[in-house]
Image (spheres, grey):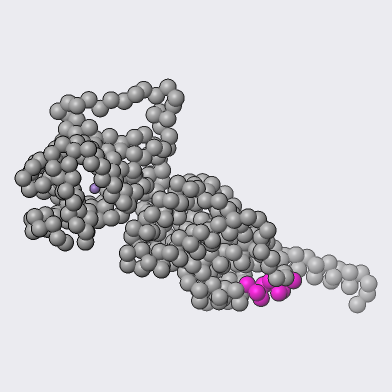
């Protein structure tokens, strides 16, 4: 071979190499995918990586975070190294990957997290990434009012049955994990949302989607999460998340500060007219109950209430209030009872505080009417959860 031919052969090789690289860049799916399932190869390269990963609604770094979150939370260990490499290339730091795994230990279990650590360590070793150091930053402060409401919900709904779980939730999960500076609150919320969708737990999504958006995730980004996860957790899980997310977005719409938040907003008076009076419905009240002056303040305020008059023998059904309720007894004689507690007598001037999530009823006594003014705050637009009617036996005996 003379020098010229050798040179030509060499440049041909270089060209071939560049072409191969170009093809490789376009093809993420391994050749075996094309051998076995050519359709899957097409969807992988043309749709998933050729279209979805390129959508601007979510940054590449965010796509990597939620992809790794989906893989870790569903225990897909074999796919973790590839996506951790991609995540590092997309700007996710090694410390953030470590903290994502820590966060998801709580949301999808320790075994998945420990398995993920083994896979991630391989990538860190191959890239020469050393041992992680703890963040020198102080714990992130949480919004005091939102945190108080959250802790009260856990104490009311979890503590009676599983007191240690409630205590660990408040002290460790929210008091420590959620305050760690190793992952920003927005990213922590984002990976938690992704894990909840991936493991098929949309019931927990409203709290975390709201929290994510409170922490700076935009609506467009939030809506893109199930779109992306359709490919990593499957269509059913993505589709199940959509109506839940839709309700969250709608509730945030109604909570947007409206005209009422202007310093020039008018004082509003709900006149004591017959039109402002309604009769309590039969699935929520027993006996004749009249409700007047019902109001709900303009968001972001969340207080509301009304005046409720019960004839003798009338009472509410069993119910709870997510953030509690205050009753101001105006006239007559009444009874108030929490489940498992004593039936209490109340009269004019008495003030009754019903703690959050305590199952209870209130109404007139059996031989006197009673009127009270009731005030409660709404949580995510809800101020009361109605349950079954109070039986005559429970009402009269005062035992439950
Ligand atoms: Mn009540």
Looking at the image, residue 39 sits to the left or right of residue 258; the answer is: right
Residue 274 appears in the figure? yes
Residue 216 placement (x, y as % from top left): 54, 47
Q: Residue at x 69, y 65 (%)?
A: 133
Looking at the image, residue 86 sits to the left or right of residue 171; the answer is: right
**Viewer-nearest residue: 349 or 153:** 349
Q: Residue at x 22, y 38 (%)?
A: 349
**Viewer-nearest residue: 143 or 52:** 143
Looking at the image, residue 222 sits to the left or right of residue 328; the answer is: right
Q: What is the residue that sits farthest to the right in this orientation?
A: 3
In the picture shown, does residue 96 fall above or below 381?
below
Q: Residue at x 63, y 72 (%)?
A: 120
Residue 157 placement (x, y as % from top left): 33, 60
Q: Quadrant of the N terminus?
A: bottom right
Q: What is the residue that sits farthest to the left in this orientation?
A: 367
Residue 128 placement (x, y as % from top left): 74, 71
In the picture shown, does residue 367 fall above or below 241?
above
Query: Magenta span has 126?
Result: yes
Residue 273 placement (x, y as % from top left): 17, 26
**On the image, which quarter does residue 139 sit in?**
bottom right
Tag count = 0
**On the image, which quarter does residue 240 sit in?**
bottom left
Q: Quadrant of the C terminus?
A: bottom left
Q: Main secondary structure of the magenta part?
A: helix
Q: Residue at x 10, y 58 (%)?
A: 397
**Viewer-nearest residue: 289 or 382:** 289
Query: Magenta span has 363?
Result: no
- Residues rendered magenta in the picture: 120-128
**On the image, which quarter does residue 352 sit in?**
top left
Residue 232 appears in the figure? no
């Amino acid at each position: 071979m003379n020098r010229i031919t050798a040179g030509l052969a060499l440049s041909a090789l270089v060209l071939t190499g560049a072409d191969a690289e170009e093809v490789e860049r376009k093809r993420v799916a391994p050749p075996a995918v094309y051998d076995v399932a050519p359709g899957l190869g097409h969807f992988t390269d043309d749709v998933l990586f050729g279209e979805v990963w390129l959508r601007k609604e979510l940054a590449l770094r965010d796509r990597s975070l939620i992809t790794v979150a989906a893989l870790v939370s569903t225990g897909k260990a074999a796919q973790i190294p590839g996506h951790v490499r991609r995540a590092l290339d997309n700007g996710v730091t090694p410390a953030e990957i470590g903290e994502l795994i820590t966060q998801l230990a709580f949301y999808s279990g320790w075994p998945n997290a420990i398995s993920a650590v083994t896979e991630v360590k391989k990538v860190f070793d191959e890239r020469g990434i050393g041992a992680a150091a703890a963040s020198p930053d102080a714990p992130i402060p949480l919004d005091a009012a939102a945190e108080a409401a959250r802790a009260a919900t856990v104490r009311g709904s979890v503590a009676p049955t599983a007191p240690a779980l409630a205590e660990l939730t408040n002290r460790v999960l929210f008091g420590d994990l959620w305050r760690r500076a190793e992952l920003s609150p927005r990213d922590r919320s984002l990976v938690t949302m992704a894990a909840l969708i991936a493991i098929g737990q949309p019931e927990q999504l409203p709290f975390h989607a709201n929290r994510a958006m409170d922490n700076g995730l935009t609506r467009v980004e939030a809506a893109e999460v199930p779109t992306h996860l359709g490919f990593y957790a499957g269509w059913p899980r993505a589709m199940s998340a959509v109506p839940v997310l839709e309700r969250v977005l709608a509730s945030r719409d109604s909570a947007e500060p409206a005209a009422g938040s202007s310093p020039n907003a008018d004082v509003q008076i709900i006149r004591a007219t017959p039109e402002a009076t309604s009769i309590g419905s039969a699935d929520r009240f027993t006996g004749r109950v009249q409700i007047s002056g019902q109001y709900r303040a303009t968001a972001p305020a969340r207080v509301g209430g009304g005046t409720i008059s019960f004839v003798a023998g009338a009472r509410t059904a069993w119910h709870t209030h997510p953030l509690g309720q205050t009753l101001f007894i105006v006239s007559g004689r009444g009874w108030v009872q929490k489940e498992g507690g004593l039936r209490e007598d109340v009269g004019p001037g008495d003030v009754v505080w019903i703690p959050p999530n305590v199952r209870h009823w209130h109404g007139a006594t059996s031989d006197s009417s009673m009127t009270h003014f009731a005030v409660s705050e709404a949580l995510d637009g809800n101020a009361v959860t109605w349950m079954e009617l109070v039986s005559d036996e429970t009402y009269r005996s005062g035992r439950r």
